[in-house]
Amino acid sequence: MSSAPPPVPRPMTVPEFRGAKARAAKLAVVTAYDYTSARLADEAGVDAVLVGDSLGMVVQGHATSLPVTLRDIIYHTRCVIRGVRRALVIADLPFLTYQVSPRQAVRSAGRLMKEAGAHAVKLEGGTRMAATIRAVVAAGIPVMGHVGLTPQSVHLFGGFKVQRDEAQLLADAKAVEEAGAFALVVESVPADIGAKVSAAVDIPTVGIGAGPGCDGQVLVFHDMLGLFTDFRPKFVKRYADLGSQIRTAVETYCQEVRDGTFPGPEHSFR
Ligand code: KIV
């Protein structure tokens, strides 16, 4: 009896991602910064992989995402794109690579698409970024918006604080939608506001600390797997404790090297 090969999953497209809201299909998004984690996330069935500038914290060890450069995101997106077969790959525009002018934004976004192979870009800001989003979309580049706690403005907010200005959040979400974004990250807002923002726009909202009323969720890979323990926001759910598993595994390796148990005959050539 011949067994049929497993079906090849169809790649996720921007229109399909955008249309998930109309189909009432919740979107699962996770960040990834390298080939191996992107491949694991893709095989696990995520709808999109975000090459987030959160890599400034969880990969580079900075206190904020502000030092991340466009070159960093290009490098990491290239690694991620090789690991992904189905998911949409969205690359973050880092701080000061798009805020100066819509022209600068088109250039930077273009590099993420052309040099790194991203399928879409994400940028932070609502009403104040509408003209910029419009320009990038007009260049043929799909844009995901990001409102609420926008970490690149952390110093303006005075810290990583929950954003509660409902009127501003609604205006920001609508401005991002009207400017042509295909989806919207909503970060660190009370759950009732997350639900109201989601109801106010036709594009899918992808929440992080924005409650269950969003159309999808995104988590940072290192947070959800217990790999990053410098701090843990309330909205993070740990699905695994890989940090302590890795520590124990490496400790065991060190011990076996030192007491001569490793390598054994099964790991040696005759
Ligand atoms: O940089 C990032 O990882 C993000 C997500 C947390 C939304 O922007």
Image (cartoon, grey):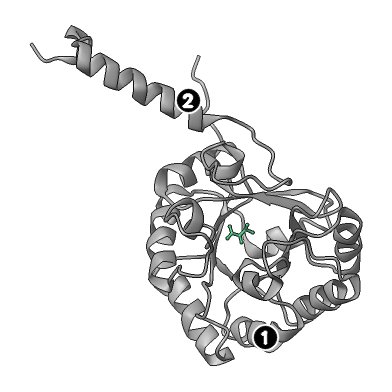
**Is there any visible trace of residue 123 in the rendered image?**
no
Which quarter is ligand 1 in?
bottom right
Q: Label 2: which residue?
A: 245
Badge 2 crowding class, 10 Å Cα cut-off, few under 14, some 14 to 19, many 20 or more, is: few
Q: Residue at x 85, y 66 (%)?
A: 164
Q: Secondary structure at mark 1?
A: helix
Question: What's under tag 2, amino acid-wise?
Answer: Gln
Tally of numbered discs: 2
Say which of 217 and 114 sits in front.
217
- Is 196 drawn above or below residue 232 in the view shown? below
Quarter occupied by residue 172: bottom right
Residues marked 2 and 1 touching at CB (< 8 Å)? no
Q: Give x and y (percent) for residue 240.
A: 59, 30
Picture disc at residue 182: none
Say which of 203 and 101 sits in front.
101
Q: Give x and y (percent) for residue 14.
A: 64, 64
Q: Residue furthest left?
A: 270
Q: In the figure, is residue 253 to the left or right of 130?
A: left
Q: Label 1: which residue?
A: 134
Q: Give x and y (percent) for residue 110.
A: 48, 79
Mark 2–mark 1 distance (CA, rounded to whole Å) = 46 Å
Q: Residue at x 43, y 76 (%)?
A: 111
Q: In the figure, is residue 165 to the left or right of 181?
A: right
Of label 2 and label 1, which has the lower sequence position? Answer: 1
In the image, the residue with mark 1 has its CB under 8 Å from the nearest atom of ligand 1: no
